Image: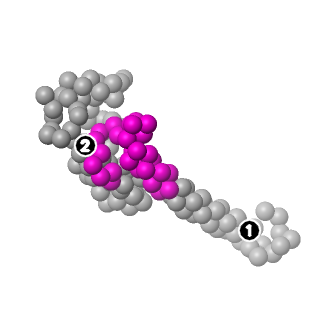
Amino acid sequence: MPSRPGTSLILDHLRYDYRQYLGEFGDHTDPRVTPLLCIDLSRAAPAVVVIAQCDPLRDEAVAYAGLLRHCGVPVELLEAKGMVHGFLEMGGVVPEALEVVEKLATHLHRLWKTRARERSLYHARSVSRRRLRRGRSSVDPHADP
């Protein structure tokens, strides 16, 4: 019996998959298992959340992206129109899945470049602060790092 019209998930398969997902964690309310139950995600890494339009778990993914955003975490939401749960594994059969993988790669590349730029600026500021604490000008080309 399908769990929602228009999807390929079957309840027994969903239960099995959930048990596999839980693994050693027996408690589904553990925030490490269900991040939607986490009170503070402000230290989470920037994210790209991919959702399938016809996924029964779509609403949870949208809520997770919203929670990340609420906690100040940079997040991008990438929706795959007409796709079902697990579509990323169907790239060899469903050409549209490969298109989403390419979009995801673009999103991740942009996110990586942004983070690399931020780390570079942070490092430059840290070096300048250390030099100033030592009484050296941050613009002195002869100063030791």
Counting from the top left corner in percent of width and height, residue 57 is at 24, 42
Q: Amino acid at mark 2?
A: Asp
Q: Position of residue 99 (x, y in %)?
A: 43, 50
Task: Answer with left or right where residue 141 lies relative to residue 11.
Answer: right
- Compared across the picture, whether 39 is left or right of 3 comes to right
| Image label count | 2
Q: Nearer the viewer, residue 80 or 73?
A: 80
Residue 104 magenta-highlighted: yes
Front in this rendered view, residue 53 or 61: 53
The residue pinned by badge 2 equals 55
Q: Return the x and y of residue 36 as percentages of the image width and height.
A: 28, 46
Q: Residue furthest right?
A: 142
Using residue 14 as the reference point, say whether residue 107 is left or right of it: right
> Please, what is the dominant secondary structure of the magenta stretch?
helix
The residue shown at (18%, 28%) is 11
Q: Is 2 placed above or below 145 here?
A: above
The image shows residue 106, relative to residue 121, as above or below, that is above
Q: Residues within 10 Å of mark 1 (few under 14, many from 20)?
A: some
The residue sitting at 57% across, 63% down in the picture is 118
Q: Label 1 vs label 2: CA separation?
A: 53 Å
Looking at the image, can residue 5 be seen?
yes
Looking at the rendered structure, the kind of residue marked 1 is Arg
Relative to residue 4, is residue 47 depicted above or below? below
Q: Secondary structure at mark 1?
A: helix
Q: Earlier in the sequence, mark 1 or mark 2?
A: 2
Residue 114: in magenta span: no
Q: Quadrant of residue 78?
A: bottom left
The answer to whether residue 43 is above or below residue 135 is above
Q: Determine which residue is flagged by label 1.
A: 131
x, y percentage for residue 31? 32, 40
Q: Quadrant of the C terminus?
A: bottom right
Residue range of the region highlighted in magenta in the rendering: 79-108
